[in-house]
Image: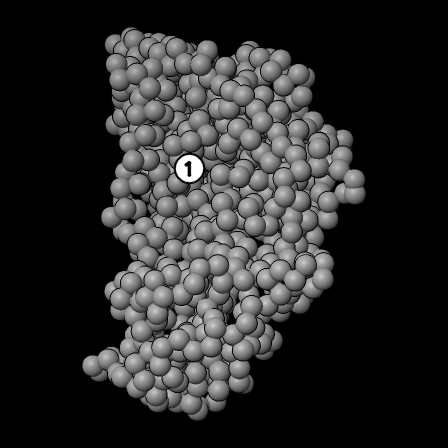
Amino acid sequence: MLGAAIAFYGPALRRTGGLWPAPLDDVYIHFAFARSAALGHLSTWIPGNGYSSGGTSLLYPLVLAPGWLIGFRGVWLGVFAALVACVALIDLCRSVQGLVDPGAGTREGAGGEALGPRPPSRARWVAWGVPLFVVAVPLLDWSWFSGMEVALLGAVLGRALLAVRRCEHAPPHVRPRAQWRAGLWVALLVATRPEMAVLSGALAVAVAHAAGTGSAVKALLRAGGPTGALLVGQAALNRTLTGEWSAAGAVRKLVPSNPYLSPLEVVGEVARNVMALRVQALESALGGATWAWILPALGAFAVLDRRSRRLALPLFLGGIGALILASFNATARFQNLRYAAPTLMMLLIAAVLGVAALARRGRPGGLVAVALAGPAVLAPSVWFGRQIDHFARSSGNIAEQQVEVARRLAAMTPAPRRVLLNDAGAIPYLSGLPAIDGLGLGGYQGMPFARASVHGVPAVVELIERLAPAERPDVMALYPGWWGGLVEPFGQRVDGVTIEDNVICGAAEKVIYAADWSALEDRGAGASEGQGELRSGEGSGELLDEIDVGDLISEKEHQYVIPAPRGGWVVGAVLDEMVAGGGVAVGGSADGGRPRKRFDAGRIVPEGREESFVIRAGVPRGSARLVLRTDGGGPLGLRVVVEKGERGRASGGAAEGEGAGRDGELKAEGSGREAEGSGREVEVPTRDEGRWHVVEVALGEVEGGDRIRIQAAQGAWRSFHGWLRR
């Protein structure tokens, strides 16, 4: 075990120049959550940012927190993480040895009490080979020693399997207590890695199956209840504090979260991930197609064996389930296939149980066990050199880019107020600066940054616009290629770090920008449309309601329906702002009288599709006008419908004027023409590029709760904002 650790850490330390190696920037996410936990801020990425559901492991930061408290600070928390990994792997080996060698020592009860000596076991020799199995797969070793939670997961898995086995052998009078203990260990699996939920359920069923004369239902509740309570409690907490049932990582990374993909495209993407993981993580990593079948075959022997079936079958089902769940992750094929680690772990343990099952069959079975175990352990070794080299290069990438950017930010004078990032790892943790993770894994005051980042960069900017000016980031550290439409209008390059031989970072260059948010509106300290603070917006007349298309909070408040899939794409623009009367707004003397720019995000409604929203509650019944903001472009046709409950009602009244009105303001074409039973048709003429335009439509009588549907009858409609006026 120690030799394997040295084999990975040694070359990596040389590559980083002595800095403790971390081959993934995500390692520092755990470190940040651990630091916050040590400071008394549980489930918080950075103190002051509020609750975050972006930590992939609930348990691991709590295990690391004591290390931070006793002095393992900065990158050196990685040393403590390495110690945790080594101890965890030793504990895993001891647990698996206890599973395959029931002849060693004494039998134990549910509470660990001695129940007398155990008979000798023919599988005792298998226990000595357990450490070889644990470190046999270099791809898994990469994750064992990465600083991530994988090694801790292995230790918890070993303990959970032992607890389930003890339920099987515990006397009836202590069996309920054994089942509760197993249930707690099974729940800790999910608290360590969420995709272990499938295994947790299967193990709970195994406990119920082993209930004997007791109630299987009660056994199932004891073994599965803690996991169910954990999942329900976490989902309820997420919903309460973030508005999402799912964790931020699931919102950001899972393929079905992409609103623009059709169901068939989702299935295709998941299938590609399954194939990649199967071929690269379960075939090539195990020594190639010639040898990769051996580990599953050994696991199959364990399933067929009566004594090991209750553990081996859940391990098989859990491994398959974890692989399928990982395949729903859009990043499953990247970061050295690290999401396959739980499956490889379960497969290895099942294989060890299979070797023990064969060994217990006497000399013929023992010979078969040796014949299969040898190639199973040796075949993957061809990957050791490649994985050790990749570990070192990855650690070098993180040190040379992420850690270096953190150092430069920390040295800036004056110190940045807040940094906008596209990763929640080393940069905020090592710089010590307040930060907002644009991808949403860090969380910020319950705002939906994770969901917005999936919809598109302009949706993220809309959330920044909701912040008070003094709260907005004044520095950005981003990959330019990831943030088109953000760095150009809002950033000025001040520094950058470029690395060579990039194998793990999102891009070779990380750029530091000074941020300029002057094109955003000042909404005050968190003012939102849904809280009664409506902005004046475009047009004139009493403002009844406002929807900011592309702003997910405003859209949620108005039950906005996007034309998805394959539609509703978020777009953004910074264009000349219009003022009442049709003129172009200009800046002050410092701007030299230049036109004032204004940012807005919106969505593209393809021809033949529609968007819709509900008028906020409390708007009194009466006639109203709908004022829509759009950008420049060619002529198009809209159809506007107002629906009340289940009954559709065409918008009444006459359109105000015909053709283009004042400069920058487009009146609804058609002067009273109504589409046949389906609303008012509006013809929008060609509009100049470079500035915002508005389209006005008379709706007749509307009230709160009515749904307004805007259909792109001819051409694609670019919808940015809507105001309801009287």
> Along the horizontal axis of the image, is 467 left or right of 224?
right
Q: Is residue 379 visible?
A: yes
The location of residue 495, given as percent across then percent down, is 66, 34
Who's the residue at 44% across and 26% down the image? Answer: 336
Q: Split into 4 quadrants, where in the image is the N terminus?
A: top right
Answer above or below: position of 575 versus 579: above
Q: Residue furthest left?
A: 676
Query: What residue is disc 1 on?
Result: 331
Which of the pair 215/509 is nearer the observer?
A: 509
Who's the residue at 39% across and 85% down the image? Answer: 656
Answer above or below: position of 479 versus 516: above
Q: Residue furthest right?
A: 414
Who's the residue at 47% across and 80% down the image? Answer: 724
Which of the pair 551/144 is nearer the observer?
A: 551
The location of residue 416, given as percent across then percent down, is 73, 45
The location of residue 119, given as percent across then percent down, is 42, 19
Rendered image quadrant of residue 615: bottom left
Q: Is residue 309 visible?
A: no
Answer above or below: position of 465 versus 418: below
Who's the residue at 63% across and 19% down the image? Answer: 16
Q: Residue furthest bottom?
A: 622
Which of the pair 657/35 is nearer the observer?
A: 657
> Along the horizontal axis of the image, is 108 left or right of 46?
left
The location of residue 243, given as percent across then percent down, is 51, 61
